[in-house]
Image (cartoon, rainbow, N blue to C red):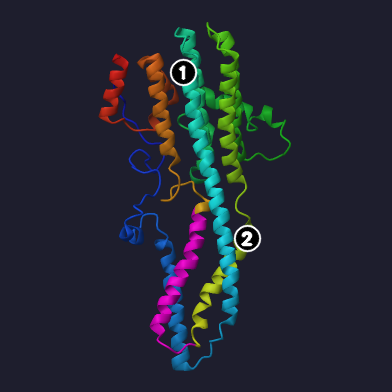
Amino acid sequence: MTFPKRECCTSRNPMTQHNFTVTYDSENHFQVLFQCWGSAWPRVMPYCIFNVIIAILTDLLVKKYDFNFHYTGKGHSLMTMIVSFLLVSRILVSYGRFNQVRSSVSQVFSVAQRLIHQIAVFSSSNMNQSGKEWRHEMVFLTMVQLRAVMAVIDYDTDKIASWELPEMDSQMATQLREVLFLDDTTKRFAHHTWVSKCEENMRVPVRLALSLRKTIMSSCKRLDEEMEGAEVNTLLGTVDGIMNGYYGIRAFLTAPFPFPLVQMSRTFLFLYLFTMPFAFLADVTNPIGHYIVIFFLTYGYLGIEFVAIELDDPFGDDDNDFNNMRMCCIHFEEVYTTILDIDGEEWADKIRKRFDGGKCSEDLPKEAASWLQQSVEV
């Protein structure tokens, strides 16, 4: 079995990276302390250095030119509690949102995989042409549904809508545009006068879910041996599971962290950090120690803020972002092996060609190709 040369669908090659996100050995203290991959150090370091420079300049101005910048620092002591409270609240809310969207993404992938298996098992008694065509249609719609969800996730990064994806065949792209408010005929049913490309892109998985449900219900006419009612209901429920995960993702994308809290915490944080050097002027002990303390206090407080910023946006090309396209590619290859197992190499190749999966994954390793060939022979 041969696999044509394939290109990756994203600028960050998901299949040449060995990790889904930043990894580390928690038992290796040296690695944890000095690893730069995914660290907050590169982003925080300029602020730490800038704050130390402020401390050095103010110290020189006081000693050489007798400028009076210092104050008692009682205001800083009171502000410490406010800044700490705002930072802790922000990081907790951000981490909660991060866990929620991570669970939603995982649900979309796991339930989509379950749907593929259910399609294969429930219709396995229909091994004729009509049964294979129905499975082909169901599998294709499921793959397009999953890819459309990824397009919604990555839209802020690449600005590519679902109907513009290279994996989308022209017929499917045309059908999608006809049922969205991008079409002049459909637009007249909109409740608002403006239509956003981003908003319509979020509507695509919903329309594809409808197509999946219609195709499931058409099984009674297209399959020679009808599935049992419980099996049909299970398939419909699995589609609901995919959509529940997608709605969780959409809620995360459309309801960001409350801006007033971000603004307040950022204002107090910057005011607190960059006035810190003035609070140390009243202490006439060794200034080198002051510079070291200012450096690490800036790293600690501002580092937490940058961690919260990372958690607020877990999608994209940053080191700590989810590599959702790599997970998507792995799911597609699981789909191909499932169809290869039940319908053979011809139909597995058909679904690959129709989906144009070459835009989503590279060549499988030789050992994987050999294993697939053995599966066909068996």
Q: Is residue 303 above or below residue 187?
A: below
Q: Secondary structure at mark 2?
A: helix
Magenta residues? 283-310
How far is disc 2 from disc 1 in space, using C-alphas? 49 Å
Q: Main secondary structure of the magenta part?
A: helix
Residue type beneath disc 1: Ala
Q: Which disc, if any, is residue 169?
A: none
Q: Residue at x 60, y 37 (%)?
A: 247
Foreground disc of the pair 2, 1: 1
Residue type beneath disc 2: Leu
Residue 16 in the image: state x and y as whole percent: 33, 40
Q: Which quadrant of the figure contains the C terminus?
A: top left
Going from N to C along the chain, the mark reached first, 2 or 1, is 1
Residue linked to disc 2:
261
Residue 351 in the image: state x and y as whole percent: 43, 21
How packed mark 2 is, by other alpha carbons closer than 10 Å (few <14, some 14-19, many 20 or more), is some
Q: Is residue 293 above or below residue 193?
A: below
Q: Residue at x 56, y 41 (%)?
A: 249
Q: Is residue 159 visible?
A: no
Residue linked to disc 1:
120
Residue 24 in the image: state x and y as whole percent: 35, 52
Q: Which quadrant of the figure contains the N terminus?
A: top left
Pick the residue in front: 16 or 287: 287
Q: Residue at x 72, y 39 (%)?
A: 192
